[in-house]
Image (cartoon, rainbow, N blue to C red):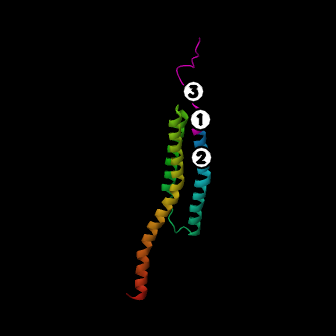
Amino acid sequence: MKTRSRGYGRHPKPRAAWTALIVAVVLCAVIVVGVLLPVLGLIGGVGATTFGTLRIPVGAITASIVISYLIGLGFLALTFLARFGALAWITAVAAIIATLVGSLWPLFATAFASVAQVQDVIPFVQELIGRITGS
């Protein structure tokens, strides 16, 4: 009875690993198109309707997107290299989460910046009311 050897002791990649990779790539692409682009459009629309009075943290938004997407690409690379289905699914989910966080963070960064800006306006309005009323 003859046994077949498959190379240098490497096991073929299981279907679960390939499935995890395909699902992660598709979902990451859907997140970029379905979440990031509308969020950036919303932020741009808010910036345009406020005529530049709202300070949008463009640098922080850009850095957060780049960093989180690089992390997501790293996890996708680990998913591609994984030889076990469970490990591939773990890294695939991590890639999806990193992409989702990177896509949603610009919304939160803009909200935090606008709240900080409003907190700067409140004392000015109170002082203005005090000047008008004479108190």
Label 1 – label 3 distance at C-alpha: 11 Å
Relative to 38, is 50 above or below?
Answer: below
Q: Secondary structure at mark 3?
A: loop
Tell me which residue sits at (51%, 36%) in the image.
86
Assign the magenta stretch its main secondary structure. Answer: loop
Would you identify the image quadrant in which residue 22 lies?
Answer: top right
The residue singled out by tag 2 in the image is 27
Magenta run includes residue 123: no
Give the percent coordinates (x, y) of residue 28.
58, 46
Magenta-drawn segment: 1-20
Q: CA distance from mark 2 to mark 3?
A: 25 Å
- Amino acid type at image mark 2: Leu
Q: From the viewer's perspective, is 106 left or right of 130?
A: right
Q: Which residue is mark 3?
A: 12
Disc 3 crowd rating (10 Å Cα; few below 14, some 14-19, many 20+) is few
Q: Image point 52% across, 32% down: which residue?
A: 84
Q: Write the residue at 44% across / 78% down.
A: 125
Residue at 40 percent across and 84 percent down: it is 130
Left or right, 47 with reference to 126: right
Q: Quick one: quadrant of the N terminus?
A: top right
**With respect to residue 4, does 85 lie above or below?**
below
Which residue is disc 1 drawn over?
18
Type of amino acid at the residue the image marks with label 1: Trp
55 or 81: nearer the viewer: 81
Q: Pointers 1 and 2 in contact (CB under 8 A)?
A: no
N-terminal of the pair, mark 2 or mark 3, is 3
